[in-house]
């Protein structure tokens, strides 16, 4: 390249979604311009593939409306730029004032989705949360995969023991409630999932989709089967019934560990294919055929995603996805559902853990805490009708937009307006952060190094990677980790440096004492000295995890092993091999058991049975339709609508309905319709589609950009849409996980004219 063209090429993983595709970022670092972003053909995971959202990191970096400096709301409601020290002072004073006046429980915190894509946040999130000293902890997980975490707690003894499809070696994929061709895979980090699904078919495999909408993924499948929203639990139980009735049980190498097989057989007796045909809309013959094909296939995987989680029986459904796999030998075996081995050592053998939910409860509806979280569905009521010293008076949100992403968002919108104090760590002034008194915006991805923290835990092939910084950090900005550390340190009455050093020493002591670590026995001083090669901050914390982790160099004990420096040398993903069977070594239940009959799960069986009995009595003439969600290629939940490249085109927030359902209501293509649920009403354009199941309508979430309080002019003009969570009902939850139901909401639809 000639010297008068100052463009350089930087390798980064895309931080927008779990696929974490490899990007080549062409940038002029002097003028701080991103020239172009393209796929990295040498990235062994994504092989040059990118989706439209890959352009977002350029768009976000350039967006004039992105916040670059802390801002505070003045008494007249205007926003005023302030320096960081003043901002931290305001945040800490605001939180402490509420804590002193009302007690610890008066503070709540909500963490959103993008924190998973910032490796710098990972080492400090625990200390940050501890410094807030509240039990009012909410995250987007209780709108997402929380049921799967509860299921893993009960089956395997730990929430993060998550089965991931071994997609590239699978020959029979049963996909329930996921649309990976659009979402690009979730709980399955698999860049270019479309190509991988096509490859599955090309090698003679089969791939079947169950979905109330004939999705982009379903169009590629061997077979698509409509299923009524929320009813997969019955379909899966019928599979279990058939597996026992037809002698298809084959526990394989897990047989010594599995406990409770007989009780599952007994429970399944109530759910024969005939018994569930009406409620699921799937014929008994189809259920038997699919079950036999799945059970007998050599390398088969049952995979469930959002449509199996954010439903009325999300936990039982997620659990049954694993149960059918365990019973047929398709869990922890090649081509089935397997368990990755992340480089940070997050998924290694460890002490037994008791699943012990309900150490405390929410104030109003008394929902039990699970893994230290309360459901998003109770967030608004804890604020607007909280009880005594449990009433929430102050809130801190980080990388989330719960007004658009949690149930009855309109109620939350009003509730946030009534808080005594609110702070947000976010890069936009949006529907949620507009309620804050102070907003702290972190630097963008291109101005920091990154480390893939989340995706290796769900990757279909083991890997590790670092990403290189493109631009020098804006001198007036701070990285996210520094913001967390600063707040935590100030709340603890320490300096940032003291807190960081304390954490590093503690982590070192913990990791060096693990007998299976390659760093076992390395003297503390030696490890600390070697870690000084990385600057203060997350990089040396990550270096520690990597070097003491399963592939690590053990600080020299295993010279060929990995360190952060080695990962940084390439900035490409490092191939750590295909997934290996390893469930037996990582189980956390006492005695290394897999508990099919955990009492927490069995406790939800009466609810399941009574719903089936009740539905047999109900007439089918109800006017209600069932609302489900719909992800779209150019969106990422609520937050990319302000980027012109992604907001262009026709308005996308439409209600899809089958033409015959429209005819029955005298509705026509394109007209404005009113959609009403128990909690709210929205008006949007109707789109007729043969891809919809009869009786089901679909709309995307993440829209509803309006009003003068937000600073998202492109979103407001190009893709305002309406808030799907104005319709979702905070009373409708998967009871045993508290997860909000976003699929299967009863609604009525009529003409807005
Ligand atoms: N009806 C319905 N509701 C749903 C869903 C559904 O399918 N249907 N899906 C649910 C699911 S799966 C999820 S994960 C949730 C998502 O719910 P949320 O996490 O609440 O929503 P996001 O849109 O992901 O929030 C992104 C926020 O992070 C900010 N942000 C982006 N990058 C950064 C960063 O680097 N640092 C910081 N501090 N902020 C950043 C953005 O400005 C934005 O405010 O929505 C849930 N809600
Ligand atoms: N482009 C894009 N990609 C994304 C996101 C985005 O907003 N946009 N969000 C990201 C996030 S946070 C997540 S968690 C993932 C989610 O990843 P996916 O789960 O793959 O994404 P969804 O499109 O929500 O797929 C859910 C599917 O379930 C179907 N469904 C609804 N109800 C039922 C039911 O009861 N049974 C069955 N069998 N199916 C049902 C819906 O029709 C839909 O096709 O996507 C991620 N990727
Ligand atoms: S699929 Fe996800 S990771 Fe890959 S380019 Fe698109 S947004 Fe980025
Ligand atoms: Mo999600």
Image (cartoon, rainbow, N blue to C red):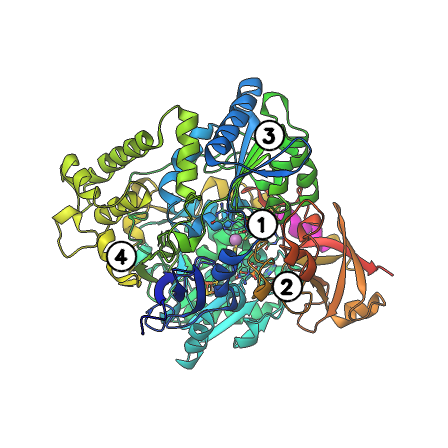
Residue 734 covered by magenta stretch:
no
Who comes first in sequence, dot 2 or dot 4?
2
What is the x, y in percent for residue 546? 25, 49
Q: Nearer the viewer, residue 16 or 355?
A: 16
Q: Residue furthest front?
A: 4
Any mark on residue 313, and which?
1
Task: Tell me if mark 4 has few (under 14), some (14-19) or many (20+) residues whose alpha carbon lies within 10 angstroms of its own.
Answer: some
Q: Quadrant of the N terminus?
A: bottom left
Mark 4 highlights which residue? 568
What is the x, y in percent for residue 616? 71, 55
For marks 2 and 3, give the one nearer the viewer.
3
Give the structural element (helix, strand or loop) at label 3.
Answer: strand
Task: Tell me if mark 2 has few (under 14), some (14-19) or many (20+) residues whose alpha carbon lies within 10 angstroms of its own.
Answer: many
Q: Nearer the viewer, residue 306 or 223?
A: 306
Whole-angstrom CA distance, mark 3 to mark 1, is: 36 Å
Query: Which residue lies at the image location 52% right of the left edge and 75% below the top edge?
Result: 221
Whole-angstrom CA distance, mark 1 to mark 4, is: 44 Å
Task: Tell me if mark 3 has few (under 14), some (14-19) or many (20+) residues whose alpha carbon lies within 10 angstroms of its own.
Answer: many
Any mark on residue 421, and which?
3
The magenta span reads: 608-616
Mark 2 highlights which residue? 277
Who comes first in sequence, dot 3 or dot 4?
3
């Amino acid at each position: 390249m000639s010297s008068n063209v100052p463009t350089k090429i930087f390798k980064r993983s895309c931080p927008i979604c779990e696929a974490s595709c490899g990007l080549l970022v062409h940038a002029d670092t002097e003028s701080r311009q991103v020239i172009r972003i393209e796929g990295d053909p040498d990235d062994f995971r994504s092989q040059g593939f990118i989706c439209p959202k890959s352009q977002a990191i350029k768009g976000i970096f350039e967006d004039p409306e992105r916040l670059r400096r802390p801002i505070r709301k003045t008494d007249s409601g205007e926003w005023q730029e302030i320096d960081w020290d003043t901002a931290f002072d305001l945040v800490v004073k605001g939180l402490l004032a509420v804590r002193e006046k009302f007690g610890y429980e008066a503070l709540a915190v909500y963490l959103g989705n993008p924190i998973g894509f910032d490796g710098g946040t990972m080492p400090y999130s625990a200390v940050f949360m501890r410094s807030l000293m509240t039990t009012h902890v909410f995250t987007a997980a209780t709108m997402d995969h929380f049921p799967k975490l509860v299921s893993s707690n009960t089956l395997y003894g730990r929430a993060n023991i998550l089965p991931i499809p071994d997609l590239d070696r699978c020959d029979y994929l049963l996909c329930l409630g996921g649309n990976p061709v659009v979402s690009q895979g979730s709980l399955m980090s698999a860049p270019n999932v479309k190509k991988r699904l096509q490859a599955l078919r090309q090698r003679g495999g089969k791939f079947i989709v169950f979905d109330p909408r004939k999705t982009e993924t379903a169009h590629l499948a061997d077979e698509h089967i409509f299923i009524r929203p929320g009813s997969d639990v019955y379909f899966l139980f019928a599979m279990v019934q058939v597996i026992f009735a037809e002698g298809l049980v084959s526990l394989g190498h897990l047989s010594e560990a599995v406990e409770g097989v007989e009780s599952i057989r007994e429970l399944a007796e109530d759910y024969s294919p005939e018994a569930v045909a009406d409620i699921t809309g799937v014929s008994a013959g189809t259920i038997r055929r699919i079950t036999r094909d799945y059970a007998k296939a050599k390398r088969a995987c049952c995979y469930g995603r959002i449509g199996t989680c954010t439903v009325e029986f999300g936990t039982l459904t997620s659990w049954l996805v694993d149960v059918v796999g365990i019973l047929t030998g398709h869990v922890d075996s090649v081509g089935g559902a397997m368990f990755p081995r992340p480089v940070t050592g997050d998924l290694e053998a460890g002490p037994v853990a008791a699943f012990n939910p309900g150490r405390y409860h929410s104030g109003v509806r008394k929902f039990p805490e699970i893994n230290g979280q309360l459901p998003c569905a109770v967030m608004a009521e804890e604020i607007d009708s909280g009880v005594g010293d449990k009433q929430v008076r102050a809130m801190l949100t980080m990388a989330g937009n719960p007004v658009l992403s949690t149930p009855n968002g309109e109620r939350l919108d009003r509730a946030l307006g009534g808080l005594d104090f609110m702070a947000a760590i976010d890069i936009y002034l949006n529907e949620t952060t507009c309620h804050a008194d102070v907003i702290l915006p972190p630097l963008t991805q291109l101005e920091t190094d990154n480390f893939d923290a989340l995706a290796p835990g769900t990757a279909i092939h083991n890997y590790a990677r670092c990403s290189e910084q493109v631009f020098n950090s804006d001198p007036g900005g701070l990285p996210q980790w520094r913001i967390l550390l600063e707040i935590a340190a100030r709340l603890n009455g320490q300096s940032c440096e003291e807190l960081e050093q304390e954490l590093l020493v503690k982590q070192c002591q913990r990791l060096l004492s693990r007998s299976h670590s390659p760093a076992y026995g390395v003297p503390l001083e030696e490890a600390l000295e070697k870690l000084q090669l990385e600057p203060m901050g997350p990089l040396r914390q990550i270096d520690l995890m990597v070097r003491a982790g399963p592939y690590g160099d053990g600080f020299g004990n295993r010279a060929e092993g990995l360190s952060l420096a080695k990962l940084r040398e390439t900035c490409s993903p490092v191939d750590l091999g295909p997934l290996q069977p390893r469930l037996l070594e990582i189980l956390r239940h006492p005695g290394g058991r897999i508990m099919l009959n955990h009492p927490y799960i069995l406790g939800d069986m009466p609810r399941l049975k009574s719903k089936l009995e009740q539905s047999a009595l109900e007439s089918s003439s109800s006017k209600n339709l069932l609302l489900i969600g719909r992800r779209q290629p150019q969106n990422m939940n609520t937050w990319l609508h302000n980027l012109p490249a992604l907001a262009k085109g026709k308005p996308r927030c439409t209600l899809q309905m089958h033409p015959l359902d429209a005819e029955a209501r005298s509705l026509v293509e394109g007209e404005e319709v009113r959609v009403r649920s128990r909690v709210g009403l929205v008006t949007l354009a109707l789109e007729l589609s043969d891809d919809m199941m009869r009786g089901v309508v679909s709309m995307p979430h993440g829209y509803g950009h309006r009003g003068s309080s937000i600073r998202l002019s492109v979103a407001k003009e190009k893709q305002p849409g309406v808030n799907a969570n104005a319709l979702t009902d905070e009373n409708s939850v998967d009871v045993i996980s508290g997860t909000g139901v976003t699929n299967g909401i009863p609604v009525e639809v009529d003409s807005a004219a």
